[in-house]
Amino acid sequence: MSAIANAQPLLSRSKSRDGHASFTVSAREAFWIALEALRVHKLRSFLTLLGVVIATTTLIVVMSVINGMNLYIADHIANLGANVFILDQFNWANTSDEEWIKEQRRNKLIRMEDYEFLKDNLQGYKAIGAEAWRGRNSAPVIRYRDHALYEVQITGETPSMMGIGQQQVGSGRYFTESEYEHSALVCFIGNDLVNEFFPNSDPLDKVISIGGQPFRIIGVAQTLGKTLGQSQDDFVQIPLTIFQKLYASRPGIDVNVQANNSDQMLELEDETRALMRARHHIPYKDTDDFGINASATIMGLWQQLTGSIFAITIAVVAVFMVVGGIVIMNIMLASVTERTHEIGIRKSLGARRRDILLQFVIESGVMAGVGGLLGIALAVIVAKLVDMVFTASVPASAVLVGLSLSTIVGLFFGIYPATKAARLDPIEALRTEA
Amino acid sequence: MGVQTLTSPVQEYYAPPDSMLIRVEDLWKTYDMGAIQVNALSGVSFDIPRGEYVAIMGPSGSGKSTLMNLIGCLDTPTSGRYWLNGRLVSELTDDELAYIRNKEIGFVFQTFNLLSRASALHNVELPLIYNGTPAAERVERAQEALRRVDLADRMNHKPNELSGGQRQRVAVARALVNNPSLLLADEPTGNLDTATGVEIMNLFDRLQAAGNTIVLVTHEHDIAARARRIISVRDGKVARDEQVR
């Protein structure tokens, strides 16, 4: 009979009902113990968690600011228009000065002939346009009656440019093909000029003087607002043909190509590159003597920059987290000592090593996780403040990263104190004064 | 992990009959104090049948605490064998002992050993937590155990809101909640006044009458006299083992 009693495997219950169930039950118990411990020792917990809170806040604020700037750059600076790339004399995303100097030496101007050539030979684009720029500091004076404006951005455009970029007609119209071909003295202006010259009257069909030449206003652009404090609405656009006649010393242009969709972008970029290389007779081993720039080019350059900011942040946060983790470990060790008697009681009632281990690891993890939550809350507030004066947007991923990172730190640094607790001898532990 | 099974020849040969809840056989416990070795127990043997009410007596230093720790599966002997409820538990690992403590043994301590921050109910729930009993069943069984010790109206009180006798009754409820095969009490009245002590001893009588096996460790004669059998320990050996009732 006794042999039969023995035949029953000792831990049979432990394998069936106890196994999984007891893990979740004791994990849940551990979770409540952790929250209780936090509640009882509010100040102590807060001080303990400061490191983790600061680390999480730093991480999320930096992520938010970078994210905010990314959105901003993507929206305002790198936004050349939907599926648009720009053929320019230079690559905009030059990474080294050396490369830049090389390009300045060998790259050729993009000229009207290039534009005409691409317009005729490039296949399947949605739109193609060209524009030429004058720097603000060499811009001619613009006058209306006794008003004068300086340093206004003047560009020459093909009629097709409307719709390629972000620009929209607010009132009036854009240039016609006929005006373009006949080098008509007409202009399309930004809202800043309207505010300056025609605060109370209709600007359409008024004549302004650009560098002494009379231009009739045919249209006003929709307001674009400011980018990095620089107004995007103080510009005058004139037909590219008249621009080149007036400013013949600046024959260089940009060619803007718009693809039908993003898939076609690369195809068209490649085709443009091939056409231009053929046109410039570039041997196949040599690099391009022109630049093909897309939104992605600018974003890529930007992300290189933010990447290094982010790497530094990661390093700083890692240091904070380790320090925060060590502080948590320290307080957990104190907590184990403080609760030796309790551990003894639990062990006498059947808590296994892993139950005690779990209890303290979870307590440490929950504590750090709460620190992470505090950090996130703080970061959201800081990000809001930063957004008022600069730009910041808390990405959802940052919240997840902050919470999981801090919890993992807590779990990790809880292992050692928890192991100590789990290894306590129940008799010794019970003998300790409560 | 089926640690002790039919295939173990030792167990098959020596295993006690089923009527014996406890068999202790030539139990030794030696503490290594560096230069010298101290024998806390030097070959203790006895059987305790199911339903028995045994007091283990002895002056301090006699080895009765060591014996209690071994019977309570809080410790393992240096040599010798200990069967509890048909299982050879003297050679188990820590976690296996924890399992035995949870399933087979209900402790009642002199200092109650309740968790001070937890309610009476939660204290009684603890053993059930460590065998994975779901919450609803846990609460139900803990309430039932508290009713058995007449504390139905004190369930949500914390230990510091209870009298000594009430605390000890919570401890008894906690010891009983898992329906252990052995109730092991270590000086259960040591921290109580005489009247409350008697109350607790009456509770033990009732539990024994209901079929529980009780082992009581004490140094007080009048407490030990409540048991039916007294095992006196002296210098690590059984000095006397007598049926008193």
Image (cartoon, rainbow, N blue to C red):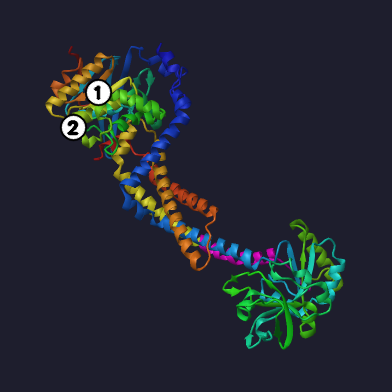
Q: Are marks 2 and 1 on the same chain?
A: yes
Residue identified by numbered label 2: B163
First to last magenta residue range: A289-314
Residue B32: tell me if it is visible. no
Measured along the vertical axis of the image, is residue A54 above or below residue B115?
below
Name the residue rendered at 24%, 35% in the picture.
Answer: B159
Q: Locate residue A274, reporting x and y percent.
A: 83, 66
Q: Locate residue B116, reporting x and y percent.
A: 26, 38
Among the two numbered marks 2 and 1 on one chain, the one whose residue lies closer to the N terminus: 1
Q: Camera-side residue: A333 or A150? A: A150
Q: Camera-side residue: B195 or A347? A: B195
Residue B198 quadrant = top left
Tell me which amino acid carries mark 2. Answer: Ser
Disc 1, SS: loop
Checking the image for residue A261, the label placed there is none
Crowd rating for badge 2 (residues with CA inside 10 Å; few <14, some 14–19, many 20+): few
Total count of labels: 2
Disc 2, SS: loop
Residue identified by numbered label 1: B149
Residue A242 quadrant = bottom right
Measured along the vertical axis of the image, is residue A252 above or below residue B226?
below
Q: Is residue B104 left or right of residue A156?
A: left
